[in-house]
Image (cartoon, helix red, strand yellow):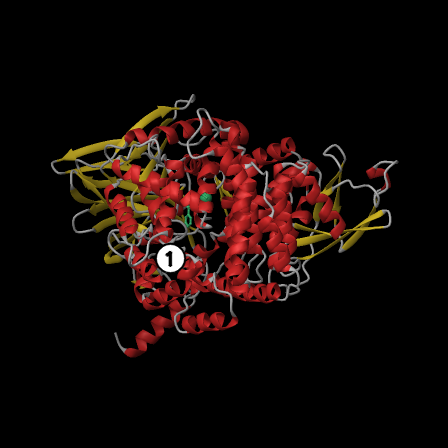
Amino acid sequence: MGGGECVRMEKKYEQFKGQSRLPKFAVPKRYDINLKPDLVTCKFAGAVEITVDVVTDTKFIVLNAVDLSVDRNSVRFTDPRGSKVSEVLGVELFEQDEIMVVEFPQNLPLGLGVLCIAFEGTLNDKMKGFYRSTYSHCGEKKNMAVTQFEPADARRCFPCWDEPACKATFKITLEVPSELVALSNMPVVDENVDGKIKTIQYQESPIMSTYLVAVVIGLFDYVEDHTSDGIKVRVYSQVGKANQGKFALDVAVKTLGLYKSYFAVPYSLPKLDMVAIPDFAAGAMENYGLVTYRETALLYDDKHSAAANKQRVATVVAHELAHQWFGNLVTMEWWTHLWLNEGFATWVSYLATDSLFPEWKIWTQFLDESAEGLRLDGLAESHPIEVEVNHACEIEEIFDAISYRKGASVIRMLQSYLGPECFQRALASYIKKYACSNAKTEDLWTVLEEESGEPVNNLMNSWTKQKGYPVVSVKVKDQNLEFEQSQFLLSGSCEDGQWIVPITLCCGSYDTCKNFLLQVKSETMDVKEFVGSKDNLVETRAWIKLNVDQAGFYRVKYDEGLSSRLRYAIETKCLSATDRFGILDDSYALCMACQQPLASLLTLMGAYREELEYTVLSNLISISSRIARIAADAAPELLEYIKQFFISLFQYSAEKLGWDPKQGESHLDAMLRGELLTALAQFGHDITQNEARRRFDAFLNDKNTPLLPPDIRKAAYVAVMQDVSTSNRSGYELLLKVYRETDQSQEKTRILGSLACCSDPDIVLEVLNFLLSPEVRSQDAVYGIHVNIEGRETAWRWLKDNWDHISKTWGSGFLITRFVSAIVSPFSSWEKACEVEEFFASRAKPSISRTLKQSVERVHINAKWVQSIQNEKHLAEVVQELAHRKH
Ligand code: BES
Ligand code: ZN
């Protein structure tokens, strides 16, 4: 080809490059896909016949493909019967744009036609597209072939219109080694064994998006059950672990029934398979009819799993099955509406879990979701729930706390505003209306608006189209309550967002409630009537709590008088667990934003001495750890007192629970015990540490000892690591030995999460290097990167030294963002923020840019917070007083 021709070619294809979405000259209707993976060479061969509808006059067909080698001579376009063949002028692949263009000498006939393409590819090691995972069987290392296509990696397996709105049917055929299990979205319709190879044909799927197509090929065992509708449900696991699938199987069968009645539409496929994959980037993936999971999110072992593991399995299964309706049957029109998938699945999973396990008080635990959403959305570098997405590489980063947790929280807020019955009716009619189709956020609002008669669109746009959320300040003035909203930012900077805020409040009792929509910046409310005729708002000591039950996605800042009434209400046990959670979390956030002294936060924390509720204590623990971190920088001379105070806070409940499980005790107590003991060990409580080590020794002698059940193992491991140093390595070596000997992934994860809890920087470095070794699957390395404050510098140096390797290994997925945020965010100085920015200036890539900005912002916030704490006048007195006050 001459230079001139080359330029001309570039020109005519230019129009297709750099676009965020494909041109829709032709749209796919049906894919007939044949895949033949070779698990030894890790290559695959494939062919696809795509029935398309040509809807505009065009000489081009443009579709997605990447990392595939397309056999240009194989590309053909025929009429639906395959008789009339159109000549193909050229086939070009543009790797950067992840597209291929097929050019024809003249316009294609309008209407149906079939595009045929043969291609080859590699089973990669990146946990996306069509990839390789490994396992051992009878002592031999083996490969399996797995797909992970969300968000935009089906194009790595076969050429396709890889956008959620391009729904089509899929007819899949696999050619695989005869001895293996081969699964796809649909049941098998035909199987043909020919010596070492078998050809399996699957039933054609209903219409669905490419990101939900899946295949899994490997050796598995399974357990099976049926729903009352006769849908066959199976859980596949590694050979020998089938029993560990029983819990998830039971949850799945029940959950399918629940969703069928909640959404008023049955599950739409004839079977559901759920498979544990040893190498898996996300937690789980909702592929239609073939849901894939990390082992830790699917398998439950009576002997070796903790209560927290059990809960994780139940919620993940409930989440992925919710997608079978919300996402798979009704799909977001574009990634901007990803939150419709993830926010809803998250929220719905709580409905199901609550119905199956009411004793877990899962709606109280939901507040963890909201708290994390609020935490991320308090950054200036946050983004709106509905976020513009232009390039495929930007999509993965929005699978974040905004789409999931803020998304789920604003749904809960809306449900609580409209009422559960009305909300459910509307959801069912939304699912019915958009089944087998695509929807945008506003489509949902429209249905809800019709069903409820409330201005849903207006109300919700203020929450999904702008980032951030308000803090509502309340003050008592004369006989009135004054409410004022302003945007809450942890950095303390000002932005002028405004929301339509569903305000709820109670006064003195949960029987005295009021609610209204705060639609403007500030409003005054006459409370005479509300408080009761006898009482006077100023004189009464009645508490006033806003955002009752923490149903709204906002924070509340009380004036001093109201704050102390609430503190007293907590001490005297007048408030619900959700409200106790909210008061603490808001106060913590206000403190971090330098709108409230640390001394008042600590004083408030003192009101939680007799707290026994899991979710509240769990948040109290994590807030304590964060305060201890900031205090190490801001007030090192007070750190010991602060730790002492925290220890005293946890002793009441820790003593109540003891070390040994009580017969028939609750799930929440089992989870709480583990967290309390871990915290006590981390804060250096001698008695806890000694007892933990004693039990660890017993465990080393007998892995089944009743002295160290799974719920408290993490506490023991953390205690052991606290003691390790270069001159006393034995605890570390022993833990590594346990890691190497177990084949249980939850146990491995627990150990990885404990190893870096050591204050000797040399050991921390060793641990971090261990994470990069072949002994740790690349999916698991992120569990081990959370270091103590003493290890902060070491981790940062390690990240810099190993950046090329880390970037190569994890750079093509979202896991790399965890390295950046976990290692950068703990710093608290302006200099460090600059250093980080400098380091990444030449290394930035689009897939981490958002996370990097957010992490640097956190460093700024910490730096400001340190300064503010250093300027506090009475901190020392308050801290010492609290530390000495015994229960
Ligand atoms: N659709 C996601 C899986 C996913 C995540 C694909 C990120 C691509 C990128 C799946 O439904 C999901 O949300 N999984 C969660 C678990 C869930 C219980 C929150 C996960 O992977 O953490
Ligand atoms: Zn999801």
Q: Nearer the viewer, residue 45 or 71?
A: 45
Residue located farthest toward the top when viewing the structure as drawn? 228
Left or right: 536 as drawn, with respect to 563: right
Q: Amino acid at mark 1?
A: Ile
| Whether residue 372 is visible | no
Left or right: 805 as drawn, with respect to 208: left
Q: Residue at x 50, y 39 (%)?
A: 326
**Residue 226 against residue 849 in the figure, above or below:** above
Residue 491 horizontal/vertical position (percent): 60, 63
Residue 488 location, quadrant: bottom right
Image quarter (top left, top right, bottom left or bottom right) of the C terminus: top right
Left or right: 630 as drawn, with respect to 567: left
Q: How busy is the neighbourhood of tag 1: few (under 14 within 10 Å), some, or many (20 plus)? A: many
Q: Nearer the viewer, residue 382 or 715?
A: 715
| Whether residue 137 is visible | yes
**Residue 830 against residue 341 in the figure, above or below:** below
Q: Nearer the viewer, residue 471 or 577?
A: 577
Mark 1 CB near ligand 1 (8 Å cut) = no
Residue 139 horizontal/vertical position (percent): 15, 41
Residue located farthest toward the bottom when viewing the structure as drawn? 3
Image quarter (top left, top right, bottom left or bottom right) of the N terminus: bottom left
Residue 104 horizontal/vertical position (percent): 33, 60
Q: Nearer the viewer, residue 878 or 132?
A: 878
* Residue topped by disc 1: 61
In the image, ligand 2 is in what quadrant? top left
Provide the secondary structure element on which disc 1 rests: strand
Q: Residue at x 48, y 42 (%)?
A: 676
Q: Residue at x 48, y 55 (%)?
A: 398
